[in-house]
Amino acid sequence: MIITPVTTDSPKGQEIVASLLQRFQTTDSSCQDAVADILQAVRMRKNAAVVEYGRRFDAPNLTAEELEVSAAELQAAYDIVGDDFLETLTLAIERIQSFHEREMEDSWLQTRDDGTIVGRLVRPVDSAGLYVPGGQGGSTPLVSSVLMNGIPAGIAGVTERVMVTPPDTDGKVNPYLLVAAQEIGITRIFKAGSAWAIAALAYGTETIPKVDVIVGPGNQYVTEAKRLVSGMVRIDMIAGPSEVLIVTDETAKVENVAADMLAQAEHDTLALAVVVTTDANLAAAIPAELERQLATLSREGIARTSLADKGVILVAADMEEAIALANDIAIEHLELMITDPWSWVPHVRHAGAIFLGSHTPEAAGDYLAGPNHVLPTMGTARFASALGVETFLKKSSIISYSEKALAADSRHIQLLANLEGLTAHANSVAVRTR
């Protein structure tokens, strides 16, 4: 049996729950030194280092002159993709654009009777870099990553949006990625991957511009590079393996539950697929259905390993326990495949995204629904949110005092400043109000 269902109150169930609650992990320490060396090399040698790593791992004949995708390559991409793709791409862009436009924040001011004005000025960052993984040597282009990261930056008003992605062995970028980027207004695209691409975005090279925000998924080298440069630039998040938790009752169809577990498991051998159900009969039927569907998948090996190593099926006493457990786990994707899921939404406190009902597979959120699919993992949904327009915005406080207002506040400001031993602070007020 690929996964053995257990009850939450059994010793094995309690052990599994404990491991789920403690699943946060930093990046694999085995790559830390290598990534630090890559960052230093790119910081010091710029294009030369980027090209050197690109030749070694991606395109053996890559040159510095070919780092930026040319106008001819951009145009040629449209000759390769079909009308069906363009139709789907247009719909996806419209959905994602429409949803994220609601996230845009406005500047605001407060005025007081004494003439004081305070407020917040909302401005976009000047530049953002979008990392797009290679997708099995360019054969599986991650178009959705282009859209989910690039569209919110555009809505925020970021002036300079650039994309980096590893080339294939011939030094080319998949045309579907090139078309997707152009359709959302990104025309500066560079052939660089892994940690050296993140380093180029963080430090800048002769060809690749330095940016203020770096977003986009990647392997452990990309993740570690983002971690090391964060603070100097903003990053979206430190993401772990993708994960789903499916809460079900007796109304859920076993084929739907198994299909959604497999949709998560095929991402990566480290992906986490969890079911918490109130129906023991459904739990017992899932393993056989997983086996049946596994045989039909192109990524059967990856999905099988993921389920065997990480997959979980838990039987809870009731829906209250199931939802409480989901809150404790704080999963990236939470599916409520239950009767009247909307009635349980007020009880959900921690989840990256919530999918309601039997007709809402997580895949809909990945591609076309509209909300962002870049979500907090490893329990960080307790405090973190999906990537959005705010990722590319910064806020400046506004403060303006009138002479009357400063005179009224003078005593209080000086009291607090003197209490903290900052007499120059107090004096800066005193000299204005004597």
Image (tube, rainbow, N blue to C red):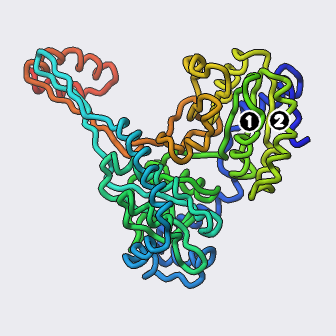
Judging depth in this view, the residue of 382 and 415 nearest the camera is 382
The mark that comes first in sequence, 2 or 1, is: 1
- Decide if residue 305 is in sight here: no
Instruction: Say which residue appears at 74% left-offset and 58% top-offset.
Output: 298
| Amino acid type for the residue under numbered disc 2 | Ile
User: Regarding mark 1 in the picture, which secondary structure is present there?
Assistant: helix
Residue 245 in picture, x, y percent from top left: 69, 33
Q: From the viewer's perspective, is 195 left or right of 280? A: left
- The residue beneath circle 2 is 286
- The residue beneath circle 1 is 257
Q: Are marks 2 and 1 in contact (CB under 8 Å)?
A: yes
Residue 41 in picture, x, y percent from top left: 53, 70
Judging depth in this view, the residue of 431 and 190 nearest the camera is 190
Characterize the local packing of mark 2: few (<14), some (14-19) or many (20 or more) Cα atoms within 10 angstroms: many
Instruction: Say which residue appears at 33% left-offset and 49% top-offset.
Output: 125
Give the Cα distance between marks 2 and 1.
Answer: 8 Å
In the picture as drawn, the residue positioned furthest to the bottom comes out as 61
**On the rendered image, what quadrant is the C terminus found in?**
top left
Instruction: Say which residue appears at 78% left-offset and 34% top-offset.
Output: 254
| Amino acid type for the residue under numbered disc 1 | Val
Residue 376 in picture, x, y percent from top left: 57, 39
